[in-house]
Structure formats: C-alpha cells, structure tokens
Amino acid sequence: MKLKKPYYLIWISALFVLVFRLMYYKDEDVIDINIHDTYFVIDHLAITYITFIGLFIIGLIYFLLYKYKISLLKPLVFIHIIVTTISVLVSQIGLFFLTPKESPFDFTFSLIDFLNLITTIGILVQPIFILNSFFSLIRHFLKK
C-alpha cells in the first residue's frame, strides 16, 4: 500500500475525533485521573480539542514536509500513519460503547483495559514521527 499523501489520513482522523465527540458527549462528561494523592478532572471537550489540534499539527507537518519535497523513510511513515489512524478510530468507537451507563453487559473493565492499551500504543508511536521528521530534515539539509 502506497501512502502518497499521508496527511489526508491524519486530518480525516482529526475531523473524526472532533465530529464524533462533539456529537456524542454531553458538556458535563469528564475523565478522572488519579495519580497517588492527586486527582485530575479533565473535561471531554478539552481532551477533544487537544487531540484534534495534535492530529492537525501532525498532518500539517506531513503536508509541509511533502510540499517542500523532504523525503521521509517510507516504512516509518507507513507504521506511524496506520497505527495512529487505527488507534484513534478504535479508541473513539470504544469510548462510544463504554459511555452508556445502563448497559446490560458487564464488559467495562476489559474494555477500559483494551482502550488504555490502544491509546498507549497510539501515544508511543508518535516518537517515530518526530525522529523520522528530524532525521529526514538533517539528511535533506546536509545534501545541499
């Protein structure tokens, strides 16, 4: 599979996050994060905007690199784009199934673990993009 313009997939993922979360979540939905004795309460809307802006910036960087003909390592681009897109889509769809409180099934703990795993993989793959961009920029400017 050739990815001629990978920034399209990233931008589509960003729009998917924005539209899906704005349509589905209510204003009072929050995420509670407990780290030792500290609780962080984060609004879903804030997470939506942070995720959207992050994905949009990644897509913009891909766009600029391709516009200025800075060649990236294709296998790393492929891995980054596929893992990022799949992790965004799976985590959004998983949150859709996790949110209903009156579910007849008791699958919340296994689904939470699965979504945490997918989100962690999606976050851990981002340094591939940073390193690929950095080394490609160095290689591009050293050739000149």
Image (tube, helix red, strand yellow):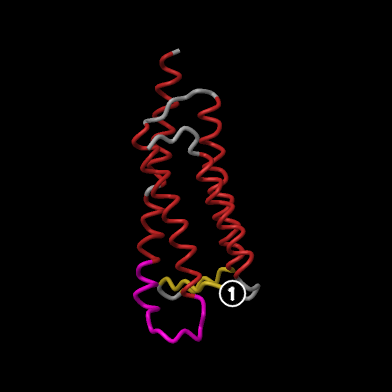
Q: Residue at x 37, y 51 (%)?
A: 124
Residue 102 on image: x %, y %: 50, 86
| Quadrant showing the C terminus | top left
Q: Residue at x 40, y 43 (%)?
A: 80
Q: Residue at x 34, y 75 (%)?
A: 110
The quadrant where residue 112 appears: bottom left
| Quadrant showing the N terminus | top left
In the displayed structure image, the side of residue 123 where residue 19 appears, left or right = right
Q: Residue at x 36, y 78 (%)?
A: 109
> From the viewer's perspective, is residue 130 above or below residue 117?
above
> From the viewer's perspective, is residue 73 above or below residue 108?
above
Q: Please provide the residue range marked out in magenta.
A: 99-114
Residue 116 on image: x %, y %: 38, 65
Residue 37 on image: x %, y %: 44, 76
Q: Secondary structure at mark 1?
A: loop
Label 1 crowd (10 A; few <14 / some 14-19 / many >=20): few
Farthest front residue? 1
The quadrant where residue 8 appears: top right
> From the viewer's perspective, is residue 129 above or below residue 32?
above
* Residue 113 highlighted magenta (yes or no): yes
* Residue 27 highlighted magenta (yes or no): no
Tell me which amino acid carries mark 1: Asp
Q: Which residue is mark 1?
A: 29
> From the viewer's perspective, is residue 138 above or below residue 25?
above
In the displayed structure image, the side of residue 115 where residue 48 appears, left or right = right
Nearer to the camera, 124 or 96: 96
